Image (cartoon, rainbow, N blue to C red):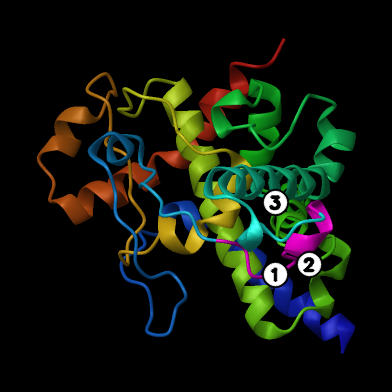
């Protein structure tokens, strides 16, 4: 059974690694990615706004962080307790999610780390085709959600496996768009506002309108004249088709 699961998973990995060439159109019925709005500034960066929601898995009891129940505290103290609890939970999620990353990359990573904070070499590894980088994304997603490590992936039920894969694909998209931004191939006049941990935590809201936002191609890109004559849907496809060339250009700039 485990061998068959690994074979099936390799097929899914192939879909992930070639995802850059496929535009994402609609979310199927029953998908958990519903609701949420976007602000104009975040739209320009390809990352929509969020409405903060608690993580239902692995939530800590209110009584574990304070001897007094939050509901019995004065309003201002209650708010402080809630903020402290949320900060503590996010820090713990980051420690779980980045454990393998810290061993692999050896650079500072915590609950505040955004994609834009990653070094070029770390980013180059994460966007490259291959299984190791995908399993590092699994480590992050599963750690943040309290589902164990990537070695536990095959023990998850089907729904949780698909959730981990969906979020990993989303993160891979954002990492590849960051690569293109660093090459000045995409338009973005403000930094991505969310940390990597927050991207995992709020994934359903971030993709809630049935489409993933695709950043616009920069006017400095050699193929911009072709791009600007396309329909909006074709523009998304066009941007995705630039990803393999962007990865190659980005990695070649690191050599030597």
Q: Is residue 15 visible?
A: no
Q: Is residue 87 magenta?
A: no
Q: Which residues are magenta?
A: 54-66
In this view, the residue in front, 45 or 121, is 45
Main SS category, magenta section: loop
Q: Which residue is mark 2?
A: 147
Instruction: Look at the numbered disc 2 and give the secondary structure of its residue.
Output: loop
Q: Which residue is mark 1?
A: 57
Query: Where is residue 161, by image quadrant?
Result: bottom right
Instruction: Look at the numbered disc 1 and give the secondary structure of its residue.
Output: loop
Residue, far left:
229
Badge 1 vs badge 3, beta-carbon distance below 8 Å? no
What crowding class fits label 1: few (fewer than 14 Cα within 10 Å), some (14-19), or many (20 or more)?
few
* Whole-number angstrom distance, CA of label 1 to CA of label 2: 8 Å
Which numbered mark, 1 or 3, is in the foreground of this view? 1
- At x 73%, y 84%, the residue is 157
Q: Residue 168, how many percent across, how many down?
A: 61, 57
* Whole-number angstrom distance, CA of label 2 to CA of label 3: 13 Å
In this image, 129 relative to 92: left or right? left
- At x 27%, y 36%, the residue is 216
In this view, the residue in front, 122 or 36, is 36
Badge 1 vs badge 2, beta-carbon distance below 8 Å? yes
Q: Is residue 64 magenta?
A: yes
Which numbered mark, 1 or 2, is in the foreground of this view? 1
Instruction: Look at the numbered disc 3 and give the secondary structure of its residue.
Output: helix
Q: Residue 85, how many percent across, how many down?
A: 69, 49
In this image, 164 relative to 36: left or right? right
Q: Which residue is mark 3?
A: 137
């Amino acid at each position: 059974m485990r061998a068959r699961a690994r074979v099936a998973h390799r097929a899914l990995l192939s879909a992930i690694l070639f995802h850059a060439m496929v535009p994402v159109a609609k979310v199927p019925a029953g998908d958990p990615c519903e609701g949420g709005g976007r602000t104009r500034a975040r739209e320009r960066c390809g990352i929509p706004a969020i409405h903060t929601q608690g993580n239902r898995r692995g939530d800590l009891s209110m009584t574990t962080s304070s001897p007094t129940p939050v509901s019995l505290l004065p309003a201002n103290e209650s708010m402080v307790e809630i903020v402290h609890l949320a900060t503590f939970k996010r820090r713990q999620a980051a420690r779980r999610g980045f454990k393998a990353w810290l061993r692999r990359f050896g650079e500072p990573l915590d609950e505040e780390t955004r994609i834009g904070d990653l070094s070029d070499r770390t980013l180059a590894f994460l966007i490259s085709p291959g299984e190791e980088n995908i399993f590092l994304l699994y480590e992050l997603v599963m750690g943040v959600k309290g589902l164990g490590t990537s070695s536990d992936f095959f023990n998850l039920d089907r729904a949780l496996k698909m959730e981990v894969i969906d979020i990993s694909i989303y993160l891979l998209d954002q990492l590849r768009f960051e690569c293109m931004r660093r090459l000045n191939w995409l338009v973005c006049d403000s930094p991505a506002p969310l940390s990597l941990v927050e991207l995992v935590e709020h994934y359903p809201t971030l993709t809630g309108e049935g489409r993933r936002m695709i950043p616009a191609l920069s006017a400095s890109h050699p193929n911009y004249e072709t791009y600007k004559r396309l329909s909006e849907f074709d523009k998304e496809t066009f941007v995705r088709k630039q990803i393999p060339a962007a990865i190659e250009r980005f990695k070649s700039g690191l050599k030597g």
